[in-house]
Amino acid sequence: RRSIEKSNAQFQKALKRLPLGVASTFRYWGDDRTIYVDHGKGGRIWDIDGNGYVDYRLGYGPAILGYADERVDAAARRGMEVGGVFALSTERELAVADRIAKMVPGVDLVRYSNSGTEAVMAALRLARAHTGRDSYLLIEGAYHGLFDAAMWMANVEEWSQRGGGDPEVVAYSKGIPQELKTLAHLVPMNDLQRLEDTFKRHGNDMAAMLIEPIQGNCCGISASGDYVRLARKLCDQYGVLLIIDEVKTGFRVARGGVQSLHGVTPDICTFAKAMANGYPIAVVAGREEVMRTFRYGGAAHGGTYTAHSVSLAAAEECLRILDETPALETLAKYGENLKAGMSRILNRRGIVHSYAGHDSMFGLFFAEKAPDNYRDWKTSDYSFYDQMAYHLHDLGVICEPDSREPWFMCEAHDASCLEDTLVAFETAV
Ligand code: PMP
């Protein structure tokens, strides 16, 4: 193992002031493994002990061009000169919204938020205001943010021991009122019959169906095109609004998001991470008639930091690059090459494996077929994957163990990153 002495010392000091020693619970990796970053550049990060890593987490996706991208950072500095926030609008809001509408076919109108959580929260509020209904449909395994309505999950551990029936719906977290549970319906991903049945039972009362088309929290489990198209059809039939949450996939898998790959137009969609290369900004966007419900007397929406001049300027430049240059093709090609290299190493040892997701964000599974729903994913054995991931850390490559986020690619991942990764991968395996 490489020395992370300084990180360990920082952790002990930080514990006194920061719960779990970190700023976000997901950054706690155990008392002797939690590391602190000194800086990132391109496709790599360096910790405070001076260890370098090829990074495939990219802040859970945002650093689409790579860390400290000079083009986006220069734009952000210009945004700084504008002055921050004014409780008034600036011209750049329209320029960025125009770019998003050009890139994403289903987007007529755009509202800004600061984080994915806020954008999805606004999307659900909007759907409820527009339909006059309260309940909504979630897909098991999806992550839509930290707000109460999004934090219902299937208790698969208990269900797999019991056998049969459906998993109980439970809150992700303490502190979420049980009363809210009656509003959330859950279905397993990619089960077409179950989706139809659920709409038959609850469709007339539901405001929205939320779908995360590539589930970032489950190693890239993906909705099939047939599933997304059936969701669209049923939503139309029952007057339910389709919310496609592209916080992680948007401006990453394709210029127009996963929705454009499936040829499905949602009523509302959300974007965040990749749109500004890591500067905090998000959007809720969609069909004109629905989006106009953001008005006095309709759905309330706002925020002190919304459309902050720095984030907005960063988004303008990042989206320009993603739209006008082959950055997305470059990083998808890198992902394809990385998977091919991993497969060569695994095949030489006769290790059965498969991938889920997209070349720009893929999950690796040590099974013949990648799971396509949370129940199968949650009940699989991941001990080999997790051990491999921890070995990779020690060898200078960061992917996500335990919660098993996909591997994220950025434009700055280059031939040297690929080579270093594959050398480490071979050793770790
Ligand atoms: N939706 C999806 C699909 C996400 O992946 C995330 C973040 N992982 C969120 C919403 C919440 O975004 P944030 O962390 O910016 O609040």
Image (cartoon, rainbow, N blue to C red):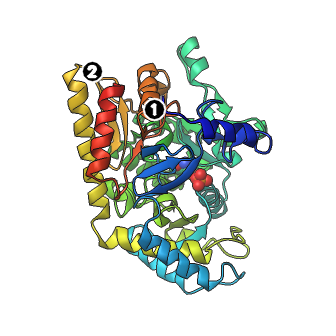
Determine which of the numbered discs, if any, sits on residue 394 in the image.
1
Vertical comparison of 266 with 144: above or below: below
Q: Visible in this render: residue 182?
A: no
Across and down, in percent, residue 124 comes to 62, 56
Per the image, label 1 sits on a secondary structure element best described as: helix
Amino acid at pointer 1 = Asp
- Rounded to the nearest angstrom, the CA distance separating label 1 from label 2 is 22 Å
Disc 1 or disc 2, which is closer to the eye?
1
Vertical comparison of 315 with 11: above or below: below
Across and down, in percent, residue 232 comes to 43, 52
Amino acid at pointer 2 = Ile
Vertical comparison of 210 with 428: above or below: below
**Beta carbon at label 2 within 8 Å of ligand 1:** no
Whichever of labels 1 and 2 marks the residue nearer the N terminus, that label is 2
Quarter of image, res 125: bottom right
Q: Does the residue at mark 1 contact the one at mark 2 (Cβ under 8 Å)?
A: no
Report the residue at 39% width, 59% height from top. Answer: 257
24 left or right of 377?
right
Residue annotated with mark 2:
351
Report the residue at 33% width, 53% height from top. Answer: 413
